[in-house]
Structures are given as C-alpha cells and as structure tokens.
Amino acid sequence: MLISNIFHYVGVATTCYWAIQLARYVYCYIRSSSLPRYNPTGKDAWALITGANDGIGFGFAEELSERGFNVFLHGRNREKLSRRQEELQTKFPNIKYKVIVSDAANIHENINLTPNEIGDANLTILVNNVGGEKQSYRGLTELSYQDVRTTINTNATFMTQITRVLLPVLERNGPSLVLNVSSIAAYGMPFVPVYSATKGFVDSFSRALDAEVKARGQDVEVLAIRVGSVRSQSNDVDVGLMVPDSRTMAAASLERVGCGIPLIFGYWGHAIAGLSLDFIPRPFMVKMLANTMDSLKKQAEERQAKRN
C-alpha cells in the first residue's frame, strides 16, 4: 500500500509539473509582448539588426520601424544596405536609419570599434540575426577549411563578439534586449553539421548570458528565438501555416519578448514542429531528418537547374 501511494503521488506530481510547464509555454504565445518597455516615450530608442539586408533581418527592420524604433542596419554590402535604407525611409519617414558595414564571415579586431559607430544613440535592442549556411546538404568531410571557418564565424563568432562590445552600451541604456536568432537545426541535422553546431552554441550562449546578466542584476533581457523553415530570398518555399514569410517570422519573434523563457520558438507553427522532435525516438528522427534534407537538396538542385 505504501509503495502504491508513493507511485500515485509521484505520478500526480509529475503530471502537475508537465501541466505547469505546458501552460507556461502556451502563455508565451497568447500574452502581450514587452517590447514597448525598450522604447519608452521620448527616449528616441534605437535597435541594431545584424544581417539586415534580406530575409528575417529585413523583416525585423520593418517591424521595429513600424513599432517606433530607429534602426542601425548592419550588413557587408554598403550599396545594398543603402538601397534598403532608402526603401525603409520611404515607408517609414519618421524613423531614423544608419548603416554599419562589416563582414561577419571575416571578423577582425575592428569589431571593437562598433560602439564608436553607435555614438550617443540610445541603443536598447541588439538583434543578432546574421547567419546561414552556404554549403547545405554536404557532409562534414565534403567541407573545406574555409567552409567551416565561414560558417562558424558567421553564425557564432560574430554574434559573440558584437554582443561583447555592445553589452556595456545596452547596460548603460537599460532596460534593453539582446535577441539572438537560433534555428531548429540546433537539434542536430544531418548534412549541415557545422551549422547545426553553431546554432547549438547560440542556444547555450543565450542561456549563459541570460544567467550572467541576472546574476549581476543588470536590466538586460536575453532571448534566443528558434526558427524553422521561413520563406525568403534564399529559401524559395511556399508560405503556409507552418512556413511564414520573413516579416511574419520577425513579428512573431518580437511578440515573444518578455516571455520569461530564454529560449523559445518564435512562430507557433515552428513550436509544434520543434516539440514533436522532443518526443520522437532519436533513430526515427535521424531517418526522418535525412529524408527531409534529401528532399530539400533535390528541390534546391531543381531550382538551380531552372535558373541556369
């Protein structure tokens, strides 16, 4: 009888625990965003978005502009950034824009000079969005030294270094936000091994930095957003319930601000896909992912053949 009671109470406690966790997670998708906290009236707040040329980065630029933030647009191509700046300025005439040019794939110590480019602007948001993988659908041994270096620099090193040099600025202007764009690939995807690893780094780095700023009593929110498939210039897929466009993805990510969880899927459809991976046995998941990646590889090859 005693053992039976123990198992009963353990079962009840476990059920309650998972029910609370689920409720907490669901609440993150129905609550109001805390983003306005980082743009108080009269403070002329700025956000810096890395990789703002295209895709989700440009989506963040549009969304933050619409919500009243001035924006630093970061990228490696000044001409393209200038065109994007003009496009945004036409659409949002009351918002200020500035361009910051640097190559995330070839980072140097001059990253330390980034605060000089910020100047006395009231920077309260850093969106670490720059990233990607140019050698998708290839095994580790098919990659060159430069392939590996570029992927790690673009997705992990640059994010870490620019956060390091701008964190004192964000602390001074607090309350402030560091939003890091991660990926469902962090689960460990075949044929993008280095990219998957860098996104795992983004997750771990974000959790650690969140713990650090809290331990120091700093008013800086750190939030990592996991992203699944998104339609963009580099990912020509059909938009649907599970596949948002870039701006929708950015908007959903900003809605998660203030949720109290340092790592979360930004878009609800991606959350469903991501949570399913937690319950699928690893051998089945690997087989499923391999089939998915093989299908994506064939689609990419077909699109490239049509362009040629």
Image: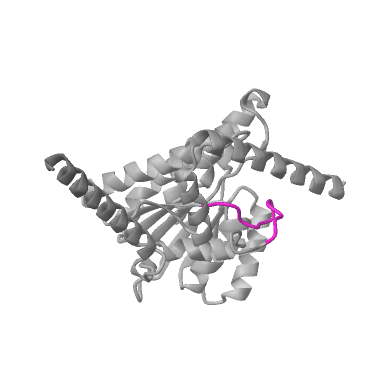
Q: Nearer the viewer, residue 95 or 7?
A: 7
Q: Name the residue at 41% across, 65% down.
A: 29
Residue 300 visible within the image: yes
Q: Is residue 1 above or below residue 85?
A: above
Which residues make up the magenta segment?
227-238
Q: Name the residue at 53% across, 59% down.
A: 269
Residue 96: image location, x then y, percent: 51, 69
Predominant secondary structure, magenta span = loop
Q: Is residue 44 above or below residue 106?
A: below
Residue 6: image location, x then y, percent: 16, 43
Q: Name the residue at 54% across, 39% down.
A: 285
Hey, which residue is sitting farthest left in the picture?
Answer: 2
Q: Is residue 156 above or below residue 61?
A: above
User: Residue 132 is drawn in which quadrant?
Assistant: top right
Q: Name the residue at 65% across, 68% down.
A: 87
User: Residue 26 is drawn in which quadrant?
Assistant: bottom left
Quadrant (top left/top right/bottom left/bottom right) for the N terminus: top left
